[in-house]
Amino acid sequence: MAKQLRIALAGNANVGKSVIFNQLTGLNQIVGNWPGKTVERAEGTLHFKGYKIRIIDLPGIYSLSTFSMEEIVSREYIAVEKPDIIVNVIDASALERNLYFTIQLLELEAPIIVDLNQIDLAAKKGIRIDAEKLSKALGVPVIPTVAITGSGIAELLSTVIAVAQGEKKLEPLKVSYGREIEERVRAIEKIVNAKLPQICKVYPARWVAIKLLERDADVAGKLKNYKNGLEILDYAEKIASELEKMHGESSPVIIASERYSLASKIAKDVTVIEVPPRISMEQKLDAVTTHKIFGYLVLAGVLASMFALIFAGGSLISASLESLLLNFSLWVEQWLPLFLPQVVVNIFSKGVLGGIIAGITIALPYIVPFYILLALLEDSGYLPRAAFLMDNLMHKMGLHGKAFIPLMLGYGCNVPACIGCRIMETERERFIAAFVVTLIPCAARTVVILGLVGRYVGLQAALALYAFDLILVFTMGRIAFKALPGEPVGLIMEMPLYKKPSIKNIALKTWSRTRDFVYIAFPIIVAGSTLLVALEMSGFMNYIVWGSSPLIAGWLGLPVEAGIPLIFGVLRKELTLILLSELVPIQSLTAVQMIVFSIVTMIYIPCVATIAALNREFGWKKALAVTLIDVSLALLIGGLAYRILSLAMPT
Amino acid sequence: MQFRHKGQKPKIENENEAVSITSLNEGERGIVSHAVGGFGLLRRLAEMGLTPGTEVKVLRKGLFSGPVEIEVRGVALALGHGVASKVFVKPLKDASHG
């Protein structure tokens, strides 16, 4: 049997960690969630020199404090699960800031190997790092790599094995602080060691002491579970206040400053500045894409061409796939009755198969090109520029610039957009962002708006609907921001250098995200579709249509039959248009009816896949709340639009 | 030089010298003197390298008092306008320095 090894990749965001992970594991990876947390957990395996190596890609973080869930998840994994080796991926072009994180790993007394990545980017900035010297300073192996090309990866793996087999010894640097802090850390460490043997089995006593001095809420919470915990907390609190009085700064800042002065010293010692940097292509691109005027033009251009590509490509693939799958389902309907009762066949072919076909005809044609373009924007480093440009506007909704990214994703598909809200720092921000995302017309709704209003009423009317939707998104965002308790969080975001994306990495990202989408969306689409077909066949649907007619016909002014497409539209929004055209001749609809129908489709309910995503990210209560708000909003606006438009454009 | 909590009395001696990062122009440099705000924000700023005594350079300012992009410890960092206005620096006169 192969010898087992467990390694974790840890490091800042934007250091190329996920590229390393993809280089190491290729297709052998599973992306999921940490148990009970909405933090992505990517795990993969590889075989090397007789070892079966399990690799965990920890989230990209800047610190091991308790700023975010990602940081807590990472440090708990390192401290509690104790992987055999931690590969600390650091960005050679931002050494000082990256070493700040390395120092914290050393404090956690984790067995680390340093992967000095992006040495090509550093070279572009005119920086060369002496890896040998850095290795001496840190007391651990340092392997230079360029992950994008795979250079240095084999050596990295060999080093991992050499360390695992004990051929290479780690003699990690012992991080010590200035006398004033050091004395206090030791005093707390001593009492932790003496009185909390249970905690010291898991966490290094010195680390606990430092965290207590930093007033770490999570560690304090752990201590409260023990008999002696409170006493030690009081003691540490007293010492921290003493330190703060001496320095006139809060203790986490004092300690961060100390760590940074060490990081800075090491970085200076090992950096060889070769040539003063020239103005590079990347810098010019950066200047244009964040420019006060040109930046916005570029952003508009990027978005417009992205959607044009998705729609042109998507509708083409969608149409051909649909006809192919339609033939298949006709074939099934022809042959299956020979073996099974007709009722079962109908439910199977219309419900189960219909659901799968629906999934395939949206998932493949629209989602895949969308994911490819998204990965391209992500890997090139463009998204932070877009966030920078939109920060001001997003603040009006109580969000900051990063929220623009999930909002933009929403135009493709709400499902990844809801999951993309994870980039927001707090639960409150995540939820506000996800709520407004559900109001953004995704590709499927765009099909309805363009196919109905755009085609029969005019493109201007369709564009007016989009403009109206933007106002709605903005207004609802602002209301949610005022209604939900909590302080808005400001933007603090790294602006990484532009990079040339790698095709392999984009392909892998697209693949794993598409798979993830299929896992979330397909079961629920199939179940929903089966249920609706069963309702229809049992005759229940007629009752629902009859019951909803006062709303559909009376309040919204639509033909009574329009209720059915709206119910089925919960599965996939573009179905509303297809079904509507089967039930009512489109030409018989008035312009007002078309507009009202499109408005309702645009906002009335998140599709089942989005509800499933909301449920996964925020729990069923919030998913239900968003659903109910969206439905009421659609009915309210639809009814008002019917009345106002009927006056404005009499037929 | 100090980072302090909201509400605490400023204890800095030459407070007048320090200005908010938002009042620097593009290309100007300063030395971080202190920041104001809650515990979480102060810690975050320090963790991202904005500790007292650190040199920063304003790279770019957004439209209509938008975010500010600064260079700190060799890294470009975007700060929302609200965050940036809470970070105070002592301006360095010599713009060509470093």
Image (tube, rainbow, N blue to C red):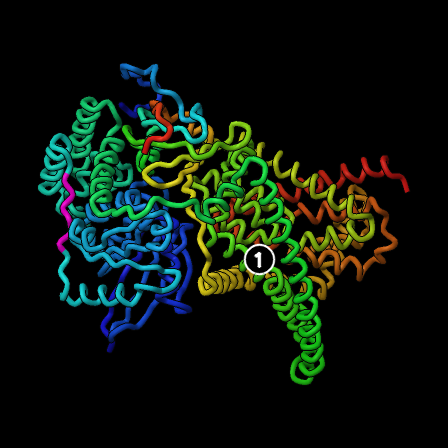
Residue lying at 51% horizontally and 56% vertically, measured from the top left: A376
Q: Which residue is mark 1?
A: A370
Give the residue at the far right of this rendering.
A651
**A306 left or right of B83 in image:** right
Is A438 left or right of A55, judged from the image as shown? right
Residue B88, image x and y in percent? 36, 24
Which of A212 and A314 lies nearest the eye of the viewer? A314
Figure check: B5 above or below A391 = above
Q: Position of residue B23 (x, y in %)?
A: 44, 23
Quarter of the image with the C terminus of chain A is top right
Q: For the point 32% across and 55% down, which residue is it? A: A117
Q: Is residue A45 left or right of residue A470?
A: left
Q: Which residues are magenta?
A: A171-176
- Give the crowd class for mark 1: few <14, some 14-19, many >=20 residues within 10 Å: many
Chain letter behind tag 1: A
The residue lying furthest to the bottom in this view is A338
Q: Name the chief secondary structure element in magenta.
A: loop
State whether residue A574 is above or below residue A462.
Answer: below
Residue A552 visible in image: no
Task: Name the quadrant containing residue A250.
Answer: top left
Quadrant where the N terminus of chain A is found in the figure: bottom left
Amino acid beneath label 1: Phe
* Image location of residue A271, percent across then percent down: 25, 47
Count how many numbered circles sit on residues in the image.
1
| Residue located 42% across and 47% down the image | A497
Label 1 SS: helix
Q: Give whichever of A217, A140 is nearer the camera.
A: A140
List x then y, in percent, for residue A547.
Answer: 75, 50
Q: Residue at x 78, y 41 (%)?
A: A555
Return the residue nearer the eye: A234 or A399.
A399
Whether residue B79 can be seen here: yes
Report if residue A629 lies within the magenta region. Answer: no
